[in-house]
Image (cartoon, rainbow, N blue to C red):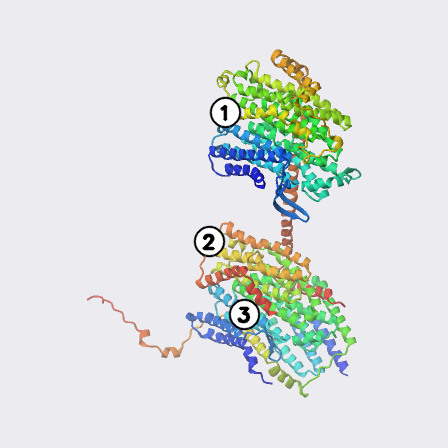
């Protein structure tokens, strides 16, 4: 049963991945990518990695793909000119891709058939994924977690640095400053001779 | 599990840098325009503080803390010390330049400090994860810094290329790391080397994974054929950023190389020797030959960087302790020289004018004999002319290469160095023989003047007494 | 004794350095050098008495005649050192060299007095020419002494080269004259050819004997007598013959034998004192000395000896012919020197080394005398050298006249004069060798006899033309004709004395005693001089032999041609014009050398320069490599296209290559 589901999801995944790069419309490409992610999440659920599956959907589809779609729809890309020359490069690119694929298959298949995958034994009592992940993340891998946090900070700082432009301030009143005004700032006595006598 | 205080004590420099980066981030937002310099001073204090914290924690042995993610050993101390020195100097050199281009903002310091943090993490990495995270932290900060000069189209293009290619390389690195995890069952470098040493794992798998890791490392270093980003980024980025990229991150990349190939994958050295050999020869060849055709000095120095990286890889591929220390020596020397060279370019630049072309150095001797002299020392050192420091660096690497039996490799290296000497000497010739095209007075702040003089004279002095630095590198291994 | 020998050699060097390298006045220069060379002479005379006459061994408390002064270096088992070998032969040479040199030094004071007139204004070389000349001739004395006193081949070579060098410096002394420069280059280059053979010979000695020391070589020589080596594939030569011939080639250069004789007549471009010193008495005799010194080697190779015999005879005869047609007074004496050198060489070739050395000694004196006499005439004639402008100088230059007469008589072999004894001895020996069946001796005998006639003829031609007959000089010169000062004439007198007497005095010692027993080795069957009956008996015997009558005939012929029937020479010249022009052209040697050797060398040099250097080395290797690198640079820079996807692609390609190469599937 699981095998059947697996093959279904994988077929859809491969089809969606192929369509991402072949379809003409970038919006459609992004949507196909969303489909690919959904099916990958499904496969991971089959592996009992429920946290990862949910996280994939939430983060990748919910955040990343939404962002992609925003950008694609905002920027009116002239798809034709971008896709020009695809036929020219396809043979070479295709060849390279096929070669890498073959190598990966050779490598993975040789071990797959010779050796059983090692069972990774768990030291801690069986808890659900999320708890296990939480424990590991905040205790064992605190260091890595902190660094990842810093990376996120840097990403934010970078984004702002690169894009923030101080718009010219529209004129407005600052009541707190108005109240604090003193006579000395507003009045200045000038000595001058008067007209006439 | 609780984290013992002693662990945190070891991590003090990193914690300090992070804290100060955050403080500067906030301070920069709220201080008035007149106190802009405060950012700079705070950043310098950070670097000095981190240096003090690191150097008061000297150790002969290595201790691994934080659940096997962080290693504190002599190599990390030495490299961190030089990274601090370089960062301090980079801040000093860049002041004038950044001020003239309205880039002298708090963000610059924050990003630099996070880059510094990334380097610290990379240098002290004992775990694939911390290595990768440090790398990403550093890279991200650098991408942002390169793109910071929004008004420059070249900077944006350079940043774009850097980012995309960097992402590709990171992806490959990660793929390799995950393969290793799958094969050995652990992500800790020490444990990986133990598992490999048992000999139970099929070599094909290991070599396959190793290749992907190599790609990531080679990209960061800038070795052929993963070097394509180097010329474009070096040229396109604002010179102050190029200065930063060319010096300290190379030390961190070297640390990454060491941690991966030596701490982790020493058992595979028969495999990675060959890979490094190919990359080294191609790098030296391409770097030296193409640099000759350049008219932009930043691009020329980029290609020369590639050639120096090739040389550096020679030392590592000998797979001996002496070879590693020779390479470390070379990396440190290279970073110092590179710092000086880009510092000189910064010196000659002013508002609205980038001293990017080689012709801008024409007749420097007439405009300012002292700076021409400093540049001459730097160029001669880069070319590997005795008694400058660069010569000792090359010599120590070649020594090890020959001692390991790769005499032909040493011959090839020397041949390419000879070809490469051309463009360094060309600069010297332009400075001393040609008439200056641009006669504007060179205005340099006092601290920069002192700093660059120390930089140049330091290279000369260390060249006369290379033992001090060399011994430091030897002691590490 | 060690100290004395060291002083003999190094005093002239000190004098030379003092006069040459420091800013000294003329007086200081000549006083310094004359004192040092004079001291050398007296010390040499003392050594001569001790070693040659008393037979005492001078070194190591009278136990050896070999001294090592300084060990330069050791190559494996071969020692390279500076040392002395002082035996009878050496002592004789030392005395001759120092005496003639001393005389020449004194003579030079007068000869070079007005030398500043020979230089163009303000030339630096001209300001100090006097001091420079003294420095050079002292340096020459040092070099020659190093040569004759050497105990090993290396020092011999040093002395050999050094005298060649100083000879070059002195021939071209008046370096602002083109002819002088041409002459000194010619001398140096021709000598170089000879030196090339010499060096090959020394190398062969080193190779086969494994030592350069004389004594060791001479000891080993007999054992190597039958060693054959292959020079050209298929032809086997005796090693000793090869060595001897190569060494003799060096002697041919130094002692001006045909065909390496071409430099000697041109060397007359130099001041007359050096013609006397170097090209009459000392340097040219270096070759003769060397062969005599190497007699243990030469005796083992009759091929080499025959070779020497033929070359010497050819030189003796054919150079004599050339002396007949010269107009320059110095050239006559020069060709005479060449001819006499031929005589000495013939003696060597006939295994009569003693006779050769004997003639060397007597010739040194009377030839120096003749040169200095010619020089005296030249000074008196205000540096006019053409004999056609002289004549009847007898009454103006009496001392010169008498001394020249004495010298000429000695030269032609007049009985009782020294030349007679040495020359007749040689002719006798050659005849003996001919009867012994030595190849070439017959030809040599006839050549030498003919040479006697020719010698007498040209000697007295010169004599009559210069001192007798019609006065052909112009009025202005005639008014200023007077005998040159004492410094010029006293050396002439001093040289005339041994020219007359030394032959008879030394005859017995030289030829018939064991004087040279330890120095010169002659194989038993080659020994020619057996019965000595005294000087007078030798003379009487000589009167019955052809040489005397031929000499007399020559003198008479000269008398008739140049005193009595003075129109005859011109007629003869017209009659035999072809022969005359061949003689005037010096047999075409110079023309051939200029065209073939000098011209050929220049052409080859041009080829190497234009093609080899400029095209190949500069163009191809130096500029070529730079261009190639530049071309590659331009090609490779285009790989950096600036297009991002191409960068990414190159990374993928790199990955692929690494995968394929390093992962063994």
Q: Position of residue C618 (x, y in %)?
A: 63, 44
Q: Secondary structure at mark 1?
A: helix
Camera-side mark, 2 or 3? 3
Q: Is residue B397 visible?
A: yes
Q: Position of residue C587 (x, y in %)?
A: 68, 24
Residue in front for this viewpoint, A131 or B17: B17
Residue in front for this viewpoint, C306 or B417: C306
Residue in front for this viewpoint, C121 or A64: C121
Q: State the residue at coordinates (50%, 55%).
A: B373
Residue in front for this viewpoint, B204 or A86: B204
Q: Which residue was labeled with disc 3? A: B81
- Quarter in which the C terminus of chain B is drawn: bottom right
Please tell me the numbered disc located at residue C486: 1
Crowding near the residue tagged with mark 1, few <14, some 14–19, many ≥20 C-alpha atoms within 10 Å: few
Please tell me the numbered disc located at residue C336: none
- Quarter in which the N terminus of chain B is drawn: bottom right
**Above or below B212: residue C401:** above
- Looking at the image, the residue that sits furthest to the right is C234
Q: Which residue was labeled with disc 2? A: B367
**Above or below C641: residue C81:** above
Q: Is residue C328 visible?
A: no
Crowding near the residue tagged with mark 3, few <14, some 14–19, many ≥20 C-alpha atoms within 10 Å: many
Question: How far apart are the alpha carbons under marks 2 and 3?
Answer: 35 Å
Q: Secondary structure at mark 3?
A: helix
């Amino acid at each position: 049963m699981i095998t059947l589901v697996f093959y279904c999801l994988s077929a859809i995944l491969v089809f969606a991945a192929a369509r991402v790069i072949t379809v003409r419309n970038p919006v459609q490409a992004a949507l196909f990518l969303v489909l690919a992610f959904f099916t990958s999440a499904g496969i991971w659920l089959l592996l009992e990695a429920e946290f990862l599956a949910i996280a994939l959907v939430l983060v990748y589809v919910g955040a990343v793909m939404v962002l992609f779609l925003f950008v694609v729809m905002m920027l009116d890309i002239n798809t034709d000119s971008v896709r020009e020359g695809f036929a020219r490069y396809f043979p070479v690119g295709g060849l390279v891709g096929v070669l890498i694929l073959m190598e990966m298959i050779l490598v993975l298949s040789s071990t797959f058939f010779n050796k059983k995958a090692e069972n990774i034994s768990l030291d801690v009592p069986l808890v659900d994924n999320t708890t296990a992940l939480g424990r590991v993340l905040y205790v064992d891998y605190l260091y890595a977690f902190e660094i990842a946090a810093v990376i996120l900070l840097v990403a934010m700082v970078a984004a702002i640095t690169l894009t923030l432009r101080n718009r010219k301030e529209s004129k407005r009143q600052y009541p707190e400053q108005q109240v604090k005004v003193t006579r000395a700032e507003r009045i200045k006595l000038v000595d001058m001779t008067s007209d006439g006598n | 599990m609780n984290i013992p205080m002693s662990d945190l004590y070891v991590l003090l420099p990193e914690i300090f840098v992070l804290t100060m980066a955050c403080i500067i981030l906030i301070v920069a937002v709220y201080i008035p325009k007149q106190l802009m310099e405060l950012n700079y001073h705070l950043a310098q204090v950070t670097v000095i503080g981190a240096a003090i914290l690191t150097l008061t924690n000297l150790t002969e042995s290595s201790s691994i803390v934080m659940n096997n993610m962080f290693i504190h050993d002599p190599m990390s101390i030495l490299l961190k010390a030089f990274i601090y020195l370089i960062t301090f100097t980079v801040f000093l050199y860049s002041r004038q330049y950044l001020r003239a281009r309205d880039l002298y903002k708090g963000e610059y310091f924050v990003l630099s400090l996070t880059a510094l943090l990334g380097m610290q993490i990379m240098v002290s990495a004992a775990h694939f994860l911390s290595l990768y995270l440090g790398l990403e932290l550093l890279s991200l900060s650098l991408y942002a810094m390169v793109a910071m000069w929004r008004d420059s189209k070249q900077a944006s293009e350079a940043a774009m290329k850097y980012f995309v290619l960097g992402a590709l390389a990171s992806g490959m690195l990660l793929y390799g790391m995950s393969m290793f995890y799958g094969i050995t069952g652990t992500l800790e470098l020490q444990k990986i080397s133990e598992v490999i040493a048992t000999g139970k794992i099929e070599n094909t798998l290991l070599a396959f994974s190793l290749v992907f890791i190599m790609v990531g490392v080679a990209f960061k270093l800038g070795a052929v054929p993963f070097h394509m980003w180097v010329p474009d980024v070096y040229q396109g980025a604002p010179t102050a950023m190029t200065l930063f990229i060319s010096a300290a991150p190379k030390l961190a990349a070297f640390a990454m190389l060491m941690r991966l190939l030596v701490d982790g994958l020493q058992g595979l050295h028969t495999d990675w020797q060959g890979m490094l050999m190919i990359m080294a020869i191609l790098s030296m060849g391409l770097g030296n030959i193409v640099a000759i055709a350049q008219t932009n000095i930043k691009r020329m120095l980029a290609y020369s960087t590639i050639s120096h990286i090739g040389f550096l890889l020679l030392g590592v591929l000998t797979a001996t302790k002496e070879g590693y220390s020779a390479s470390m020596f070379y990396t440190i020397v290279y970073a110092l020289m590179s710092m000086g060279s880009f510092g000189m370019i910064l010196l000659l630049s002013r508002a609205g004018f980038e001293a990017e072309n080689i012709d801008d150095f024409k007749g420097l001797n007439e405009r300012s004999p002292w700076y021409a002299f400093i540049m001459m020392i730097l160029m001669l050192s880069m070319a590997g002319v005795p008694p400058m420091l660069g010569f000792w660096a090359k010599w120590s690497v070649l020594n090890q290469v020959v001692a390991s039996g790769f005499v032909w490799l040493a011959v090839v290296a020397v041949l390419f160095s000879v070809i490469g000497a051309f463009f360094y000497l060309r600069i010297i010739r332009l400075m001393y023989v040609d008439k200056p095209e641009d006669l504007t007075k060179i205005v340099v702040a006092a601290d920069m003047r002192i700093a660059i003089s120390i930089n140049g004279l330091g290279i000369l002095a260390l060249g006369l007494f290379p033992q001090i630095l060399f011994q430091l590198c030897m002691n590490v291994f | 004794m060690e100290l004395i020998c060291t002083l003999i050699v190094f005093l002239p060097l000190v004098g030379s350095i003092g006069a040459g390298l420091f800013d000294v006045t003329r007086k200081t220069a000549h006083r310094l050098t004359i004192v040092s060379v004079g001291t050398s002479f007296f010390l040499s005379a003392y050594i001569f008495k001790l070693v040659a006459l008393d037979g005492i061994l001078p070194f190591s408390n009278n136990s050896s005649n070999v001294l090592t002064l300084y060990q330069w270096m050791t190559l494996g088992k071969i020692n390279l050192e500076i040392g002395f070998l002082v035996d009878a032969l050496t002592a004789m040479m030392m005395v001759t060299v120092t005496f003639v040199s001393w005389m020449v030094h004194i003579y030079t004071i007068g000869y070079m007095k007005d030398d500043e007139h020979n230089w163009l204004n303000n030339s630096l070389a001209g300001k100090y020419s006097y001091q420079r000349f003294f420095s050079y001739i002292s340096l020459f004395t040092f070099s020659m002494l190093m040569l004759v006193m050497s105990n090993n081949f290396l020092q011999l070579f040093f002395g050999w080269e050094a005298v060649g060098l100083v000879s070059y410096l002195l021939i071209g002394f008046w370096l602002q004259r083109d002819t002088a420069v041409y002459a000194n280059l010619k001398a140096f280059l021709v000598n170089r050819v000879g030196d090339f053979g010499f060096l090959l010979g020394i190398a062969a000695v080193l190779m086969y004997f494994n030592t350069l020391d004389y004594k060791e070589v001479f000891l080993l020589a007999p054992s190597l007598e039958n060693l054959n080596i292959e020079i050209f594939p298929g032809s086997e030569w005796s090693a000793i013959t090869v060595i001897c011939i190569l060494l003799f080639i060096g002697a041919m250069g130094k002692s001006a034998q045909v065909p390496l004789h071409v430099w000697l007549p041109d060397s007359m471009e130099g001041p007359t004192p050096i013609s006397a010193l170097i090209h009459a008495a000392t340097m040219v005799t270096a070759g003769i000395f060397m062969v005599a010194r190497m007699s243990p080697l030469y005796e083992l190779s009759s091929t080499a000896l025959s070779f020497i015999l033929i070359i010497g005879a050819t030189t003796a005869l054919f150079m004599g012919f050339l002396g007949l047609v010269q107009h320059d007074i110095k050239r006559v004496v020069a060709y005479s020197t060449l001819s006499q050198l031929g005589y000495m060489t013939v003696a060597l070739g006939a295994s009569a080394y003693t006779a050769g050395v004997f003639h060397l000694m007597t010739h040194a004196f009377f030839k120096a005398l003749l040169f200095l006499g010619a020089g005296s005439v030249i000074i008196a004639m205000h540096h006019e050298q053409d004999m056609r402008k002289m004549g009847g100088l007898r009454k103006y230059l009496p001392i010169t006249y008498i001394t020249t007469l004495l010298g000429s008589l000695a030269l032609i072999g007049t009985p009782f004069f020294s030349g007679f004894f040495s020359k007749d001895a040689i002719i006798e020996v050659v005849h003996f060798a001919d009867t012994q069946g030595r190849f070439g001796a017959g030809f040599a005998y006839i050549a030498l006899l003919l040479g006697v006639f020719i010698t007498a003829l040209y000697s007295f031609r010169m004599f009559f033309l210069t001192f007798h007959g019609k006065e052909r000089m112009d009025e202005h010169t005639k008014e200023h004709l007077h005998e040159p000062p004492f410094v010029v004439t006293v050396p002439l007198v001093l040289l005339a004395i041994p020219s007359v007497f030394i032959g008879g005095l030394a005859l017995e010692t030289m030829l018939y005693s064991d004087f040279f027993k330890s120095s010169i080795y002659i194989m038993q069957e080659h020994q020619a001089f057996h019965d000595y009956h005294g000087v007078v008996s030798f003379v009487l015997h000589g009167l019955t032999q052809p040489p005397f009558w031929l000499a007399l005939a020559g003198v008479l012929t000269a008398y008739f041609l140049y005193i009595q029937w003075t129109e005859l020479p011109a007629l003869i010249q017209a009659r035999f014009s072809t022969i005359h022009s061949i003689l005037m052209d010096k047999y075409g040697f110079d023309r051939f050398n200029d065209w073939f050797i000098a011209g050929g060398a220049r052409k080859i040099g041009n080829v190497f320069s234009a093609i080899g250097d400029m095209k190949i080395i500069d163009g191809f290797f130096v500029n070529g490599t730079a261009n190639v690198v530049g071309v590659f640079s331009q090609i490779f820079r285009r790989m950096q296209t600036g297009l991002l996807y191409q960068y990414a692609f190159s990374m993928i390609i790199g990955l692929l290559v690494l995968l394929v190469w390093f992962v063994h599937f």
